[in-house]
Amino acid sequence: MTTPDDLIRYGYRQELARRLRFRDLLAYGLVYMVPIAPMAIFGSVYAGSGGMVALAYAIGVVALVFTAFSYAQMVRAFPMSGSVYNYAGRGISPPVGFLAGWVILLDYVLVPGLLYLVASVAMHATVPAVPVWLWLLGFVAVNTIVNSVGIRMTAAVTRVMLVGELIVLAVFLAVAGRAIASGKGRFSWEAFYNSDTFTWSVVAGAVSIAVLSFLGFDGISMLAEEAKGGSRQIGRAMAAVLVVAGVLFIGQTWLAAMLVPNPGSLLADGDANGTAFYDAAQVAGGSWLATLCAVATAVAWGLPNSMVAQVATSRLLYAMARDRQLPAFLAKVSVRRSVPINATLLTGAVSLALGLYMATRADGITLLSSLINFGAMVAFLVLHVSVVVHHLIRSRSRNWWAHLVMPAVGFAILAYVVVNANIAAQRLGLAWLALGVIVLAGLYATGRRPVLSGLAPVQPLQRRDVERV
């Protein structure tokens, strides 16, 4: 269990309130991942995988189970906010940590903007009288207010929203299952394997899209300083949420694949309008089920999902700012609410500006999705390397399975996915990384090279000092 001594050892004070239990972490992770997330990108994954959409999600689960295991190893070693930024910085070196934090900013800073945009576009299509910009403003305002009140309020709101999402998913699974049993659609295992379309490169490319649905389990690590059970609780929650969400993703996409009204057309032309899942829902239960799924997806992305994404982003900004690698005002914590208030407000402002700008571009959603996926997967690659360097090389661990085999397998799977990812995503992601290298060089030039506290052994504090902190 993490205690104030753990943070003091690294030169930090316990500023954030430890109020989150295991069930709160589990709900947080599920809300961040969105149990009905595949509904929004089903058509893209279906077309990209040659119809083997369930296989793409199954491989995604396997790949990220290894990543979750590496997270568990590093959060025990360094039980603090900051995720890959801290793990790479302390496990390898501070400059590598800065670059890892810079890369994962593509994920954490852009994700809320993407979620707000997708939700606003969907709600505008449902209620055309309300423009996209007004939906954006409403979603951002509600989430920023809730997150500014405190982590307990965020946890309570997201639990209620999660129940709603699970009810909608249960309705779809029941209606779709009954429809297939009664002869609608066609029962098939082709969503898992189709010999006519299968190639590893095709599936890997589809996995790089499907990964978007899994992003969020890693956000639990950002709450390491707010979990009652400390680092061990964080590791358990990450593994549990990944498995639960994976099962839900595979189940709903398999049923939807059997109900697609025109598979050949979807494979050939793709899903430009993003309605493939809702078309399958209409085959299963009629227009009421299609509308229910569409509205539920929009609300889920625009409120609970973007709400917890904003929490994760603010914690990353807070962690980097208190190490003087981002402006110091982002490290300010509200004494009354125990939240990084400036980082929370900035995240809301950036998300709003980004959403409004991307709404004017025809490729706005695609561009954001590609950048987010690339940033997350590259950060995960660095995470696996951090496990090997810190535990096996520095600490001379002889736990070959946990500290070499598991991270090596996870690295290999993700590397293959990154290589087969969208070319535009690769180029934009590498350009962002190059910009990070320039910023890092600027920090060195101005005498602000990345330095993390607590890397060298420190003298234990007196008991009275610990109690005062």
Image (cartoon, grey):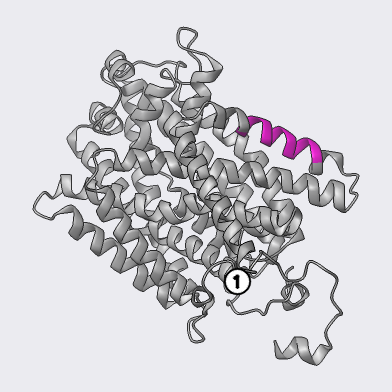
At label 1, counting other C-alpha atoms closer than 10 Å, the crowd grade (few under 14, some 14-19, many 20 or more) is some
Q: Quadrant of residue 424?
A: top left
- Give the residue at x 82% y 88%: 463
Q: Is residue 213 visible?
A: no
User: Could you tell me residue 382's position as x and y percent?
Assistant: 66, 45
User: Could you tell me residue 139's position as x and y percent?
Assistant: 28, 61
With respect to residue 323, does 41 lie above or below?
above
Q: Is residue 395 visible?
A: yes
With respect to residue 152, does 43 lie above or below?
above
Q: In the current view of this chain or complex, which residue is farthest to the left?
A: 129
Let me know if residue 406 is in the magenta part. yes
Quarter of the image where the N terminus is located: bottom right
Residue situated in front as seen by the camera: 91 or 235: 91
User: Could you tell me residue 361's position as x and y percent?
Assistant: 24, 43
Name the main secondary structure of what is drawn in magenta: helix
Q: Which residues are magenta?
A: 404-414
User: Could you tell me residue 166's position as x and y percent?
Assistant: 40, 48
- Give the residue at x 39% y 57%: 306
